[in-house]
Image (cartoon, rainbow, N blue to C red):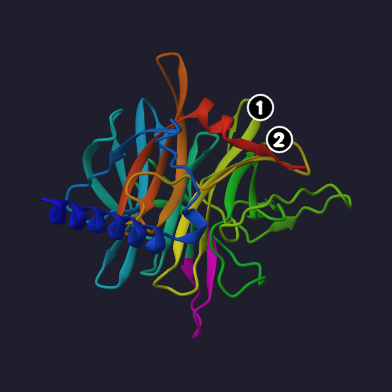
């Protein structure tokens, strides 16, 4: 009996040592968002006829939701639209959006006035692998594009992950988060963007040790400030790389100064199995007198889910940026 207990104890110790050293070093001391009460529930998104709806993005539509997501078919990428009821169950069948490309990725859907837009990245029609951001207006009745605008600013070869937000009744983009570089779109149907330049010393730079913060969800007004969820990645190689997400808050007036950021990445569930968290959009709902954030996100570049987040708990776990 003693031998059995010895080997059981040895096996238990071996398991925990193995688990500890196989766990990403930068996440070992990070408290999980579900155990802290930040994430209350996870909902799966299921689309009939689509095995893996990738990086789905949701927006309110009448008394339900409209959703954009990516489909990968034999190496080709397509953007599709579906409608969901209040419980995030599919209404009708999805429809592919003809963006005249098989390389479009990671569309975020957002509302500007009464109209719905997609912001996504797509390959440019040149020999080497260059990508630019595209803005497309969706006709929500026909699910065709009224127009699309290629926003190629010739800054980087590959452009991804701009954060859209509406300010002064105009579409803006957070081109980068650290520093908070802001672009204003002057004409919806032209590649006409202004890089907003502000006085010296007005910027804030927040500390984030889990890789460079990059755009995620469109930013929305909550409690008189903009809130957005971002992603970052760290790891020495592709096999060990991890993608995590956080949230940040910035002011409503120029220079759109960042004021708060989560103290740690928002990880939850079985973290050893989930290597990629990719936030795409969120909506705010009132439940039992509490503000709940329904965050759509992609997991492992394979499935899309909804994380139900307690807004008060989220803000309790944010720190000030100076």
Can residue 56 be seen by looking at this rendering?
no
Are there few (<14), some (14-19), or many (20+) residues within 10 Å of tag 1? few
Are there few (<14), some (14-19), or many (20+) residues within 10 Å of tag 2? some
Residue 108 on image: x %, y % = 46, 50
Q: Which residue is mark 2?
A: 252
The residue lying furthest to the top in this view is 289
152 is higher (above) or lower (below) than 173: below
Query: Where does the magenta region start and end?
Result: 122-135
Cβ–Cβ under 8 Å for marks 2 and 1: yes
Q: Nearer the viewer, residue 308 or 272?
A: 272
289 is higher (above) or lower (below) than 117: above
Can residue 282 be seen by looking at this rendering?
yes
Label placed on residue 224: 1
Horizontal side of residue 172 vs 103, given as left or right: right
Residue 285 on image: x %, y % = 44, 25
Going from N to C along the chain, the mark reached first, 2 or 1, is 1
- Residue at the image position 15 percent from the left and 52 percent from the top: 2
Horizontal side of residue 59 vs 189, given as left or right: left
Q: Secondary structure at mark 2?
A: loop
Q: Secondary structure at mark 1?
A: loop
The residue lying furthest to the left in this view is 1
Horizontal side of residue 320 vs 312, given as left or right: right
Horizontal side of residue 201 vs 248, given as left or right: right
- Asked whether 242 falls inside the magenta stretch, the response is no
- Residue at the image position 45 percent from the left and 67 percent from the top: 241
């Amino acid at each position: 009996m003693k031998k059995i207990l010895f080997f059981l104890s040895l096996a238990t110790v071996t398991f925990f040592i193995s688990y500890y050293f196989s766990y990403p070093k930068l996440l070992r001391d990070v408290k999980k968002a579900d155990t802290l009460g930040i994430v209350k529930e996870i909902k799966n998104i299921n689309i009939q006829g689509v095995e893996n709806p990738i990086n789905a993005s949701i927006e309110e539509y009448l008394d339900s939701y409209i959703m954009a997501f990516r489909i990968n078919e034999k190496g080709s990428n397509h953007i599709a639209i579906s409608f969901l009821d209040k419980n995030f169950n599919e209404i009708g069948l999805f429809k592919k959006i003809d963006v005249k490309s098989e390389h479009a990725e990671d569309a975020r859907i957002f509302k500007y006035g009464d109209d719905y837009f997609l912001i996504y990245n797509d390959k440019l029609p040149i020999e080497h692998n260059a990508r630019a951001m595209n803005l497309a207006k969706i006709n929500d009745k026909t699910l065709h594009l009224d127009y699309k605008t290629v926003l190629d600013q010739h800054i980087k070869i590959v452009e991804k992950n701009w954060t859209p937000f509406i300010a002064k009744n105009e579409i803006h983009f957070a081109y980068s988060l650290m520093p908070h570089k802001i672009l204003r779109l002057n004409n919806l149907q032209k590649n006409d963007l202004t890089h907003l330049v502000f006085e010296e010393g007005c910027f804030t730079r927040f500390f984030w040790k889990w890789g460079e913060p990059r755009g995620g969800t469109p930013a929305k007004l909550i409690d008189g400030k903009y809130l957005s969820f971002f992603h970052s990645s760290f790891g020495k190689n592709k096999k060990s790389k991890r993608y995590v997400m956080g949230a940040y808050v910035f002011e409503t007036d120029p220079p759109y100064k960042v004021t708060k950021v989560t103290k740690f990445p928002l990880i939850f569930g079985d973290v050893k199995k989930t290597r990629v968290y990719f936030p795409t959009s969120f909506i705010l709902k009132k439940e039992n007198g509490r503000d709940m954030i329904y965050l759509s996100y992609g997991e492992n570049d394979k499935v899309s889910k909804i994380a139900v987040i307690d807004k008060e708990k989220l803000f309790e776990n944010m720190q000030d940026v100076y």
